[in-house]
Image (cartoon, rainbow, N blue to C red):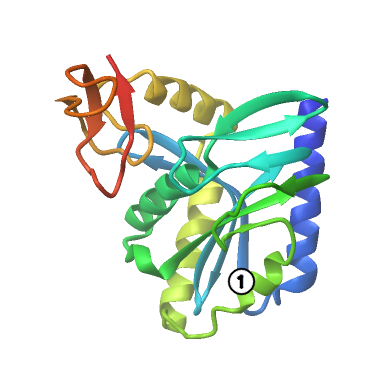
Amino acid sequence: MKLIRGWYGEKKTTFGMWLSLDSKVYKRFDDVILPSRNGTTQIDHLHVSQFGLFIVETKNLKGWIFGSESQARWTQALYNTKHTFQNPLRQTFRQKKVLAEFLDIDEPVIQTVVYFVGDRKFKTELPPNVLKSGLGRYVKQFRDPVLKFEDVNRIGETLTQHRSESSLTRRDHVRSLQKRHTSNTVCPRCGSGLVKRVAKNGPRAGAKFLGCEGYPKCRFTKNL
């Protein structure tokens, strides 16, 4: 049932983008699995245009959604039960870094969007790139060209070639996720190294933990 809901959410999002975004302006790539220095990353939808690249991470969830940009995990409340899930903004943070490196482009030309489908309601204030409607409208608000037409064509050709030649599958990606999240040497969020640190303040003062070398830009930590 979960797989069916996920498939329906993907198709609904794809159809909505197909209707609202001109295919002559935005080249669309779905289910993009890219290699990286520490495994793989999977992008639900990617649009390439002279106005930038747009990563769209879809979430098909019902109920009330609670979260903030800084929280590691968000909460879904449904039928008097609560479930937590990874902050999707952290997923798109890594996707953006991997995509920029793979295509050899600057990160600022890549925009990330988290799009929720399903019968859900946001119960906390979320960043403007976390949406439950108006996906096409959000993408089209970026009207300043940041890429030349030849760059757009090169990126499109690179992604098309990768899709036709790559043997990476979703199963490979799942195995990569499992390996990355059990690592004590590589940050699962951004791919930087993990270093040992000691908490200086708070109730865990003196406790050792692993922290990302990319701090403060990346605030991933892992208890030891």
For the C terminus, the image quarter is: top left
Q: Residue type at mark 1: give it.
A: Val
Badge 1 marks a residue whose secondary structure is: helix
Closer-to-camera residue (203/144):
203
Is 221 on the left-hand or right-hand side of 57? Answer: left
Residue 106 in percent (x, y) is at 32, 66
Kindly give the residue lying farthest to the top in the view shown.
Answer: 224
Residue 17 in percent (x, y) is at 73, 64
Residue 10 in percent (x, y) is at 74, 46
Q: Is residue 61 visible?
A: no
At x 20%, y 25%, the residue is 199
Total marks in image:
1
The local crowd at label 1, few if under 14, some if 14 to 19, many if 20 or more residues have their Cα within 10 Å, is many
Which picture quadrant has residue 48? bottom right
Is 39 on the left-hand or right-hand side of 211? Answer: right
Q: Is residue 192 visible?
A: yes
At x 80%, y 69%, the residue is 19
For the N terminus, the image quarter is: top right
At x 37%, y 67%, the residue is 108
Is 80 on the left-hand or right-hand side of 102? Answer: right
Whether 119 is drawn above or below 81: the answer is below
Whether 33 is drawn above or below 109: the answer is above
Whether 43 is drawn above or below 213: the answer is below
Residue 40 in percent (x, y) is at 43, 36
Which residue is under mark 1?
139
At x 77%, y 27%, the residue is 2
